[in-house]
């Protein structure tokens, strides 16, 4: 699809940021066609800004990267969305490769900084206009990027108004799922979140790391039909589970989206690897999605270190090509 100047004018009239982005990058204005990363009926997306580590992580840059890379869907984390809408800027975002093993516990200083940041953000969120997030969703959609997930962590300390905010932003962006890390203080937190999810009729996908077991999500799912699984098959593999495909088959109706990365089994070191070099059945999982017609998206999450001479965007393109070949 090409954009005529008249068509662009109509898009710009509904979204001023779109005009600014396109004028700064003519490829957005006269691209030969909109991005398309849906292969064999399976929607492949990317989590942003995390996967584009080492690169600008503002909303405009992320949009330009995805259009340039031919990716038409994303699970987007809160910082670039909220900052675009006027929130206080977050501390520098690192992203990138993580060492094998459990995440290190935060220091007391880090905990104090996180608490201060949370208080600052809560104050801003309770006065944030939803119209800004609706505009953001139109901006991305106007150049062919579908936002299917919004990632924001809720806690027991979050106010009810902040819970409503998280779900309202998800809807305003046009997403169908709120995603977050699997909380340590479940079942109390997943029970509370599930009630708000039912109120807003929006699924929640909980993302687990190497604590993942086949039963990890069972209690949360029993609490609410809107509590679901943001499955990371790389972490699931690194946790020592050898039944990823069986788990997908059993739980496909409650999987909101599936993160793709290649990790080794713990007996092989558990490391993140370039796709095709680890133990994670990425190809087989994608083919299962295609065969069974599962509708949840598959999300590229770049977590291995780009080799010398490469960068995160080049590696994302390799991952995308791997997925496309698997679904051919």
Image (cartoon, helix red, strand yellow):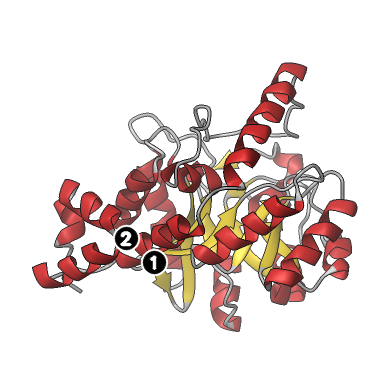
Check the image and name the residue furthest to the top.
109
Question: Residue at position x 77%, y 45% from top?
Answer: 155
Q: Label 1, secondary structure: give it.
A: loop
Query: Quarter holding the N terminus?
Result: bottom left
Query: Quarter holding the C terminus?
Result: bottom left
Pinpoint residue 93: horizontal percent, then vertical percent: 51, 32
Distance of label 1 from label 2 (alpha carbons): 6 Å
Label annotation for residue 37:
1
**Tag 2: Cα neighbours inside 10 Å, few (<14), some, or many (≥20)?**
many
Check the image and name the residue furthest to the bottom.
292
Question: Residue at position x 43%, y 42% from top?
Answer: 52
Query: Can you see residue 35?
Result: no
Q: Label 2, secondary structure: give it.
A: loop
Residue 257 falls in which quadrant of the image?
A: bottom right
Residue 142 horizontal side relative to residue 133, left or right: left
Residue bearing mark 2: 70
Pinpoint residue 133: horizontal percent, then vertical percent: 47, 57
Question: Residue at position x 70%, y 36% from top?
Answer: 269
Marks 1,2: beta carbons within 8 A? yes
Residue 146 horizontal side relative to residue 293, left or right: left
Pinpoint residue 3: horizontal percent, then vertical percent: 16, 69
Front residue of 254/244: it is: 254
Check the image and name the residue furthest to the front.
127
């Amino acid at each position: 699809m090409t954009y005529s100047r008249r068509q662009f004018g109509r898009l710009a009239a509904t979204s001023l940021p779109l005009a600014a982005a396109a004028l700064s990058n003519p490829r957005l204005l006269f691209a030969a066609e909109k991005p398309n990363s849906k292969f064999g009926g399976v929607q492949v997306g990317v989590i942003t800004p995390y996967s584009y580590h080492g690169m600008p992580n503002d909303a405009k840059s992320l949009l330009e990267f995805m259009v340039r890379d031919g990716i038409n869907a994303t699970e987007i984390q809160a910082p670039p969305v909220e900052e675009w809408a006027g929130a206080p800027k977050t501390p520098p975002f690192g992203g990138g490769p993580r060492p094998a093993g459990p995440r290190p516990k935060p220091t007391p200083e880090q905990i104090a900084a996180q608490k201060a940041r949370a208080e600052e953000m809560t104050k801003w969120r309770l006065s944030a206009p939803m119209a800004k997030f609706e505009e953001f969703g139109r901006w991305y959609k106007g150049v062919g990027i579908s936002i299917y997930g919004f990632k924001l962590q809720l806690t027991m300390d979050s106010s009810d108004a902040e819970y409503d905010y998280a779900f309202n932003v998800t809807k305003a962006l046009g997403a169908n799922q709120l995603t977050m890390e699997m909380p340590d203080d479940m079942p109390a937190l997943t029970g509370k979140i599930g009630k708000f999810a039912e109120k807003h009729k929006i699924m929640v996908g909980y993302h687990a790391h190497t604590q993942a077991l086949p039963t990890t999500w069972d209690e949360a799912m029993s609490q609410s039909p809107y509590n679901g699984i943001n499955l990371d098959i790389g972490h699931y593999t690194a946790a020592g589970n050898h039944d990823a495909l069986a788990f997908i088959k059993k739980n496909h109706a409650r999987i909101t989206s599936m993160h793709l990365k290649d990790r080794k089994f713990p007996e092989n070191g558990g490391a993140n690897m370039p796709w095709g070099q680890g133990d994670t059945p990425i190809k087989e999982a994608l083919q299962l999605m295609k065969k069974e017609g599962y509708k949840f998206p598959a999300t590229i999450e770049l977590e291995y270190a780009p080799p010398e001479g490469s960068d995160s965007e080049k590696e994302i393109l390799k991952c995308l090509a791997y997925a496309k070949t698997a679904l051919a």
